[in-house]
Amino acid sequence: MEAKIELIPEGSITSPEGFFAGATCAGLNKKANDKPDLGILFSEAPCVATALFTTNRIKAAPVVLCQQRLQQGRALAVVVNSGCANACTGEKGFAHAAEMAKLTAEGIGISPEDVLVASTGVIGLPLPMKRIRAGIEQIILSRDGGHELAKAIMTTDTFAKETAVAVKKDGNKFAIGGVAKGSGMIHPDLATLLCFLTTDAAVEMDFVKSALKKAVDISFNMISIDGDTSPNDMVLIMANGLAGSKPISQGGKQADAFQQALEQVCIYLAKRIARDGEGATKLIEVTVAGAPGLAEARLAARTVASSSLVKAAVHGADPNWGRVMAAVGRSGVEVVESKTDLYIGDTPVVKSGRPLPFGKRSLIQLLKGKEVSISLNLNLGSGNATAWGCDLSEEYVTINSQYMT
């Protein structure tokens, strides 16, 4: 029986059973004005928990703390702030992250070891702990608090990113919800993103670790905004099992349905991040087919999506397709010019390495759209992959030249 995966209207991280969230404006994020900037996610039942973290050699205090605590494979809550990354802050920063967890635990009535911490914002500044202490006391957890949490993790994001799906298969039901933030400092192998995923499915640890990695590889690891990767990146999943089904394991009856649903949630959130790139006006989708293998297809797609010249051309609706060919050629992937095909939208511009005549005006009009698709076929194998990015505008420079001023 095929799994039935349905979008939950107004779904968020608290859509799965047993999850509560809340947020408050603690005055941490100067760019947020009176919007929430401090939040808590909590499960009323113990969770199997695992996460993937930044590949940056510089790791923020919350990342180090979470890496240590997740060795036990469980969690009950997450406390998160925006406005300050608590990165490059030394021992004091780690002490502040631990204190955030302790304060949250005391407020809920659980062990500090079961609380994870995440931060995002400016690097190198100490957390304003006086405001955080007061803010944590103000947070009220509720079943619909996921929407406020989605706002609390925003930095230069212009809109909240959240979704949830309901899954039915063989008489079993469960849900997966997620929230994410990210707008700048975004590049494959995670990015300046935070993503929290919840599910009321019961899962075995080996399975959920594998499922999360597969989902992240085709979603968050396939987006690029500006080529930078931060010290704070985290994609966390918590599974509390309150849906009442048997634990999902590798090769189990529910494994494929869970994987499909998790990937759907992650891809949706990843595309929302790419669409909301700092100063962006367009979403770029790059598909590479016919690569020698999957790894090569991913590398080629990510290289094109992250090319500053391609991004600038899309921003100006300039049909300079040579930039796409140059990008895939320098990607490090095997490329044979005489076998390569290129499409912009539905318009073929290169066939077997040879330029094709096309209507310049119609192609310019296509590039003026809110979504621009670029497709390459290398005709060398069976590797296929899709990456997402955004255009590069003058506004990106403005935002990042005034980030602290």
Image: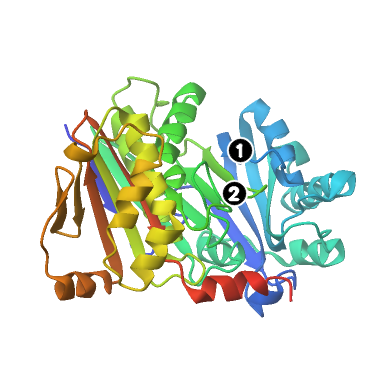
Q: Nearer the viewer, residue 392 or 384?
A: 392
Residue 45: give x, y in percent of width and height.
Answer: 57, 39
Q: Label 2 near label 1: C-beta < 8 Å?
A: yes
Q: CA distance from mark 1 to mark 2?
A: 8 Å
Q: What amino acid is found at the position of numbered circle 2 in the picture?
A: Thr
- Is 78 above or below relative to 297? below
Q: Which mark is residue 329?
A: none
Mark 2: few, some, or many residues within 10 Å (few <14, many ≥20)? many
Q: Residue at x 57, y 71 (%)?
A: 397
The residue furthest right is: 92
Q: Residue at x 38, y 20 (%)?
A: 250
Q: From the viewer's perspective, is 43 left or right of 126?
A: left
The quadrant of the picture occupied by the N terminus is top left
Q: Earlier in the sequence, mark 1 or mark 2?
A: 1
Q: Which residue is mark 1?
A: 55
Q: Which residue is mark 2?
A: 229
The residue furthest bottom is: 33
State the image quarter where residue 348 is shown: bottom left
Residue 323: give x, y in percent of width and height.
Answer: 34, 56
State the image quarter where residue 371 is shown: bottom left
Element on which disc 2 rests: loop
- Is 239 above or below relative to 271? above
Q: Nearer the viewer, residue 232 or 388?
A: 388
Q: What amino acid is found at the position of numbered circle 1 in the picture?
A: Thr
Residue 53: give x, y in percent of width and height.
Answer: 60, 39
Residue 63: give x, y in percent of width and height.
Answer: 69, 42
Element on which disc 1 rests: loop
